[in-house]
Amino acid sequence: MRSFIILLKRIGLQKIVAALIAVILIGIAYTYIANTPKDSTSEYQALIDQSKYQNLIPKLEKVLVENPDDINSRELLAASYIQRAESEPKTAREDLLKTISILVKNTYLDKNRDESFRLLGISYFYLNDITSAERNLAKAVSINPNNLDAQAGLGMIYEKRNESAKVFGTYNNILKKDSENEMANLGIARHYMSIGDANKAVEHAKAVLSSSKNNSSIGEANHILGTAMMTYNRPIDAILYFKDSLKYRPESIHTWVTLGEANIEAYKIAPRSERSTYIQEATKAGDKALTINPKYIYAHTLLYKINLLQNKYAEANVIAKTIVDLLPKDTQLAKAEKDKYFKYYSGEITNVKIKSVKTSEVKN
């Protein structure tokens, strides 16, 4: 059993890093609406910053009934739909298609509206149409080279493609023009985490926390800090940062999963008398992630791990079968990763199988 826990720990740490790189991109686009649009009223901008799309959407829909060609209000409504899409995955596609319809009309009303092209790029990114996302973000930059958030959107594309040099170059160039740019600081922090430089990532994430008033940016910065704490093997600190992140983005599914992972790591180093608390918290985090999206594979892998730690093999086998069933339709994992998942979660775990695992078989 001890050998298996060693195996589980090593695999778990690898998956935490892989999951960060893979799933953090699910929530990246949300951050890029932080400063939309440039000429909005202070009341509406405050609602955008606070992610209060529930309040803003009906207000803007009413405005557009009276003035359907109000481009600024149309952009604000599009930004609000994007926020709702990020927070409510079950209706996300519908909201994103509405957003695209609104913004396409904007580009006909004003062909030089860089903000509309920027938001179009974000919408397409959410729909995983990277070609259209890049085309519209590049169009925004060509119209207005000073639209730094549109440039940051292109950085997001390069992150998706794992083009490390372009990621660093894009965000670094933005920071040379505006050292406090939230999107660039968050983007370059993610870049540093992806190459294993947690210290630099912490520096840029804390820079955002020191000045930001935007809920999404604050939530993302705390998430990055939590992930950095995991690389430092400080899961207790990681838990605190992930919880702070969820105060600002309570429906962030990837943060719920990483909170669960942090509790698992805390369990492994905690005194026996405290372990049950961490298992309970990890389970709550996994269950919450599944209420947001029942088909989210990382939530299932989290619960699978929790059951194994408790020797609940029958429950783990049920979850493993669910993971295997979900793999063909998953849009987040690459084919190579799907193959690894299929191999790892196929077949049944039994007490005999666990005891047969040798430390020498563990690969980093």
Image (cartoon, grey):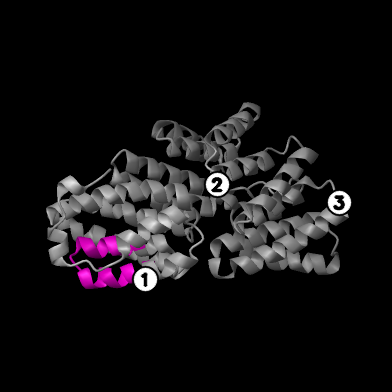
User: Which residue bears the numbered disc 2?
Assistant: 160
SS majority, magenta: helix
C-alpha distance separating marks 1 and 2: 27 Å
User: Which residue bears the numbered disc 3?
Assistant: 110
Please state, as top left, top right, bottom left or bottom right, where the C terminus lies in the image. top left
Stretch in magenta: 301-323
CB within 8 Å, label 1 to label 3 = no
User: Which residue bears the numbered disc 1?
Assistant: 322
Q: Which amino acid does label 2 sit on?
A: Lys
Q: Which amino acid does label 1 sit on?
A: Thr
Q: Can residue 266 be seen in this view?
A: no
Q: Nearer the viewer, mark 3 or mark 2?
A: 2
Vertical arrangement, residue 88 with respect to residue 150, above or below: below
At horizontal 47% and vertical 53% (from top left) the residue drawn is 23
User: Quick one: label 3, few (<14), some, or many (20+) residues within 10 Å?
Assistant: few
> Of label 1 and label 3, which has the lower sequence position?
3
Q: In this view, does 120 lie to the left or right of 189?
A: right
